[in-house]
Image: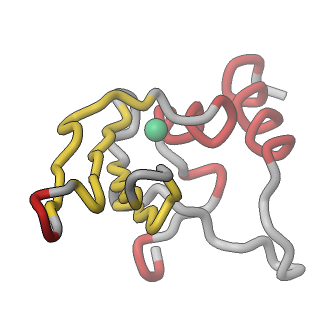
Amino acid sequence: MADGRVSLDQLNQKYLDCHIYGHTWRVQRGQQITYGRNNKPVETTEILHCGRCTMKRKDTYMLPWWELKSRRYEEPDGYYLTRPEDGSRHTRRDARAERFKRMVGE
Ligand SMILES: [Zn+2]
């Protein structure tokens, strides 16, 4: 388990579901507003949390245009996958196949 990564067949079932279906984002803390001159809001930050795998996401938007300034993720240990031996990346299809294999045994 190098740098917290795991192989697909070792991946936690909940994490596998997030790899396939995406995260179940919920707002953990909404709208931390930063004010500029004249007391006008200049940016705002939201913290989201995945109810399934516990991934955190922090989005900061510039106001008043709601332009995304930054998006950062804080993943649970063992969420990301090691690369296959050929140096490619696992796809959603690989994750589905793994889920099927666990359910059906094939
Ligand atoms: Zn998730």
Q: Residue at x 31, y 38 (%)?
A: 49
Q: Residue at x 33, y 50 (%)?
A: 56
**Residue 60 drawn at (x, y percent):** 36, 59
Q: Position of 105 compared to 51: left or right?
A: right
Determine the residue located farthest toward the front in the rendered image.
38
> In the image shown, does 93 or 64 lie closer to the viewer?
64
Q: Relative to 101, does residue 34 appear above or below in the rendering?
A: below
Q: Residue at x 22, y 42 (%)?
A: 31
Image quadrant where residue 54 sits: top left
Q: Residue at x 72, y 73 (%)?
A: 83
Q: How many marks?
A: 0
Q: Quadrant of the C terminus?
A: top right
Determine the residue located farthest toward the top in the rendered image.
104
**Residue 79 drawn at (x, y percent):** 47, 56
**Residue 100 drawn at (x, y percent):** 77, 25
**Residue 76 drawn at (x, y percent):** 34, 55
Q: Relative to 47, does residue 22 appear above or below in the rendering?
A: above
Q: Position of 1 compared to 84: left or right?
A: left
Image quadrant where residue 87 sits: bottom right
> In the image shown, does 71 or 97 lie closer to the viewer?
71
> In the image shown, does 10 or 19 lie closer to the viewer?
19
Q: Position of 94 compared to 48: left or right?
A: right
Image quadrant where residue 82 sits: bottom right
Q: Position of 57 compared to 13: left or right?
A: left
**Colour theme:** secondary structure
